[in-house]
Image (spheres, rainbow, N blue to C red):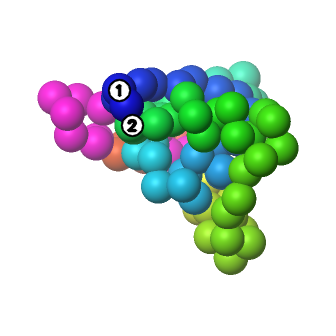
Amino acid sequence: MNNSNVTTTDFYLAAYLMAKSYQLAGHVRANGKSQFEFEGNGINESLDDFYQDRAVISPQAYGRTIRNLKAIMYNGTTLKPQNNCDNYTRKIS
């Protein structure tokens, strides 16, 4: 398996990938829409499972990641990877 990156604006796909323990490599919210970037080994197989309706995930983990992603989206958090380290910044209005 190779390490791949996936970028999506599909909130429920993002929650699924996060619940499957793929690393959230980036998040940007612009014009009221969030874009999530994930990376990890086997991510393409997980995408196939999601879109082919073969995905299996703990309901508790899925619900927890939905809440976590909403917090990221609505609290103004932008995630920008920098030098292989996650750098979280909070926008101040």
Judge by depth and name the residue closer to the eye, 60 or 87: 60
Q: Is residue 40 magenta?
A: no
Asked if labels 2 and 1 touch by Cβ distance under 8 angstroms, the answer is yes
In x, y percent, where is residue 44? 55, 29
Q: Give the image quarter of residue 85.
A: top left
Residue plotted at (37% across, 31% down): 1
Q: Which residue is tagged 1?
A: 2
Q: Give the image quarter of residue 51.
A: top right
Q: Is residue 2 above or below residue 17?
A: above
Residue plotted at (28% across, 42% down): 86
Magenta range is 75-87
Give neighbour class at mark 1: few <14, some 14-19, many 20+ (Cα, 10 Å): few
In x, y percent, where is residue 28? 54, 30
Q: Is residue 77 above or below residue 36?
A: below
Give neighbour class at mark 2: few <14, some 14-19, many 20+ (Cα, 10 Å): some
User: Disc 2 marks which amino acid?
Assistant: Asn
Q: Is residue 11 above or below residue 28?
A: below
Q: Is residue 50 visible?
A: yes
Q: Which residue is tagged 2?
A: 41
